[in-house]
Structures are given as structure tokens and as C-alpha cells.
Image: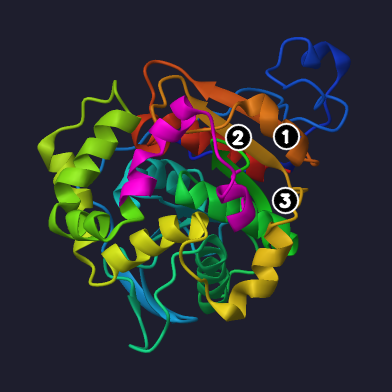
Amino acid sequence: MDRKDRPNRVNRRRFLEVSASVLASSQFLPGQAANAGLVFERPIEVARYETPRALSPVKQVDAGLLNVGFIEAGPVDGPAAILLHGWPYDIHSFAEVTPRLALAGFRVIAPFARGYGSTNFLSKGTLRTGQPSALAVDTIALMDALDIKQATVAGFDWGARTADIIAALWPDRVKGIVSVSGYLIGSQDIGKIPLPPKAELEWWYQYYFATERGREGYDRYRREFAELIWRLASPKWAFDGQTFARTAAAFDNPDHVEIVIHNYRWRLGLAAGDPGLDALEAQLAKAPQVGVPAITLEGDENGAPHPDPASYASKFSGKYLHRVAKGGIGHNLPQEAPEVFARAVIDVTGS
């Protein structure tokens, strides 16, 4: 193997404290420089790879309340990277991230969230809740089932929120996080606060889902609905029908509609959560800081609702860096800019 084709390994010496000279040229947000940053001895180049025609075969494992479907790639003894998708997306968002990380030496795990793909509940009697803490507990249960003591957790949309939550509540299980759109931990009380009209308009689907018409409409037109969200959230992304169809199949899960509707109704305080998760939600309602190393990402053409990076910078108290993916990159950043996402995972793991 030629030297330039060798997979890069995570180098601990690359994760350095920031010097004053570097701070002047890096993208740290105001107020963050004094705490930490991510600086590297040289740019990290991910090994060459062939664009996959399809993902690895889906595996299944019982984990907590679920039988989880997931893909796995890379060496089993490599540092673990758990990749978490959001709505309305699935594990195919990481189709080009996964081989990059696997060739860089990572053990990559990308699971279907509850209500998606081949992930199913073990019991018919389990409450079909989509509240944020439930998705985080699912991920910890998956780590336990796969004997993963610590991992870099990276995600977007629901997956980014889950990464934030795990880092805040179980920091010992997290090497670092990559979170698209930053700090997304919220609560029902926050969800009840009215926003200015323009901001409320961006959340139109949330209010649609609050009605029975919305539930029925999403159930009947889930593919059409998802495709509309893709186009609104990523206005410059020229995805084709085959790309969308691969992901849309995941919405055929029997619990998909119930999980999605509950997620958005719970945020507005219109649906009760799992009483067993009340203690976790109480902790999250305090907006806990994230102290593990973190890189937040944002696309320069993200058409979905997302906070201003300056509004959440202070929530990351450990080593922290914010990056913007340019070139018409929308909400589905790992699928639209896989190199940017993969590099962030590599960089944040190198502590």
C-alpha cells in the first residue's frame, strides 16, 4: 500500500491546547477561546475509498426496550463512532461517512432510531414515546449491548440532540461529540414559549402534527411529506429519486408515525412522556453544559430551523470548535458533505 493510501489513525498528540497565534486564524466563537479549542499538527486526510453502492448488511441486536437494526464497519478494536440520524432521514445519511471512518480505523456503528427501518420494540406493551431522553437511553443501551464502553457520538437533527444529551448526562461514556446545529437540548417548558411569527412559520409541520388531521396526513403521505422536508431543509441539494427511495423505505416501520407524532407533540407539552424518564427530563430541563470535546457543524444553506451558533457557544465548556460547511450544504450535512462530517469525527476523537 502506498503511503498516501494508508488509513490514518487517530493521533492523541493532535489534540492540543490553543495558542494565541492559532486563535487569531481559527473559527472559535466569541467567549470560547479561553476555554479550549481543537488544533492539529497537520490537516487530517481520510484514506481513499470507493463510494459504496450499498451499505453493509444490517445487523440486529436486542438492546434495552428494542431490537435494534444497525450497520457496522471498520475494525472491532478501533475507537467506536456512533452515528445518529434524525427525521425524516435514516442510516443512509452516513453512507459515505461510514467507509471514510472505517478506513481511518474506527469501529463505526449507525443504528436505525426507534420507529425507523428494522428497529422494533421487544414488547407490544411498551409506550411508543419519541421524547428526546428515550432516544438517548436507546443509544446507551445499544452501547451496552455491543460492549462499547466509550464512543464518539455524532449526529444531526434528532441525532444531534441525542449526542448532546448523552454527552451531558453520561460524559464518561463519550470520547467526544459532533453535533450538527449545535446545542439542541430542550424541554417541554421551552417548547411552550411562543416565538416570533417568522420563526413559528418554520415549525409549521410541528403544529400540523399536533392535530389528528396531521397524524392521519403524515401516515397517508409519509413519503411525500419527507421529500418535501428534504427539499425545504436542503434547498441546494440535488438528490435523485433513488437516493430518496433508499431512505424512505425506513418509514415503513410499524411504529414510525406514532414515534414521530409523539416526538413533536411532546415538545409542545401536548403529549405525556414515559414516567420512567421523568428524572432524566428534569435534568435536561436545566440545560446542562456539555463538557466533553465537541465540534459543532452547520451547513451554509440549512433551510431547517436552527439556532445561531453564538447562542449556544457557552453551553460547551470543554474543548470546542464550530465549523461551517460551505457550498450550498443543507440540513442533512453528513450526506451532503460527508468529508466535512467524517473529518469532524476524526478530529474530535483525537484527544
* Sequence-first disc among 3 and 1: 3
Image position, residue 116 (x, y; %): 30, 63
Residue 326 percent across, percent down from the top left? 45, 17
Viewer-proximal residue among 183 and 146: 183
Residue under numbered circle 2: 296
Disc on the earlier residue, 2 or 1: 2
Give the alpha-carbon distance from disc 2 to disc 1, as whole Å: 8 Å
Q: Are marks 2 and 1 in contact (CB under 8 Å)?
A: yes
Looking at the rendered image, the disc whose residue lies closer to the viewer, 3 or 1, is 3
* Circle 2 residues within 10 Å: few <14, some 14–19, many ≥20: many
Answer few, some or many: residues within 10 Å of disc 1's Cα (few below 14, many 20 plus, some between 14 and 19).
many
Q: Which residues are magenta?
A: 184-208
Does residue 244 appear left or right of residue 334 in this picture?
left
- Where residue 90 appears, as percent x and y from the top left, is 32, 52
**Residue 232, image quadrant:** top left
Residue 308, picture quadrant: top right
Quadrant of the frame with the N terminus:
top left
Q: Residue at x 44, y 65 (%)?
A: 130
Kind of element beneath mark 3: loop
Q: Residue tagged by mark 1?
A: 320
Residue marked by disc 3: 287
Residue found 72% across the figure and 32% down from its top: 313
Q: Which residue sits at x=57%, y=29%? A: 44
